Image (tube, rainbow, N blue to C red):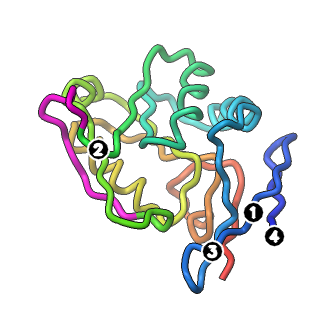
Amino acid sequence: MNTYTLTIGSLTRELPIIPISDSLSIASFVILGDTEIVSVTAPMLADKLPEVDVLITAEAKGIPFVHELAKYLGMPRYIVARKSIKAYMEDPLVREVNSITTQKEQFLCLDRKDAEFIKGKRVALIDDVISSGESLRALAELVESAGANIVAQAAILAEGDAANRDDIIFLEKLPLFE
């Protein structure tokens, strides 16, 4: 199996290169279950963030990272945009999203109480990897519709052309393989 060697700070990971279409492959970076990556990268990214009131991520891979980041920053709470409307949600805000690693259209949903919590606050959108930016765009539209002020968009890795963007904060680049 082909792999890509990723180094972030003192950590190295061998990432399997996985085809996602006939012409494109990615180095599969999965932080779920990797407590070492999460605990080492959270303080590194925290040091790059501007002053924020709330961290927001989309379900699911960003959750352990945003949790550790919020702990490091001394925040008692963070927000997770869910990928489906849950029965407990009252009057949720919803946005459609398509990303390069998603096989079909998905949705991001924010419970009304979370939307009210972030209204007028300085927020940072957090993810594990930013690639095409579609997930981040949908998350931005969702939190802006709630009245939040986005002051940062950040991830552990910027994949492909995302590494050339000047509007995101990230720790390392991750190539795409054609």
Residue under pointer 2 = 84
> 93 or 16: nearer the eye?
16
Residue under pointer 3 = 19
Reply yes or no: does residue 99 show up in magenta: no
Q: Which mark is residue 1?
A: 4
Q: Position of residue 25 (x, y in %)?
A: 64, 74
Q: Give the mark, 3 or 4, whose residue is nearer the N terminus.
A: 4
Q: Do the numbered discs 4 and 2 sit on residues whose CB atoms are within 8 Å?
A: no
Query: Horizontal placement of 135 versus 87: left or right?
Result: right
Q: Give the mark, 1 or 4, whose residue is nearer the N terminus.
A: 4
> 3 or 163: nearer the eye?
3
Reply yes or no: does residue 93 show up in magenta: yes
Q: Quadrant of the N terminus?
A: bottom right
Q: Which mark is residue 16?
A: 1
Q: Do the numbered discs 1 and 4 sit on residues whose CB atoms are within 8 Å?
A: yes
Query: Horizontal placement of 116 versus 172: left or right?
Result: left
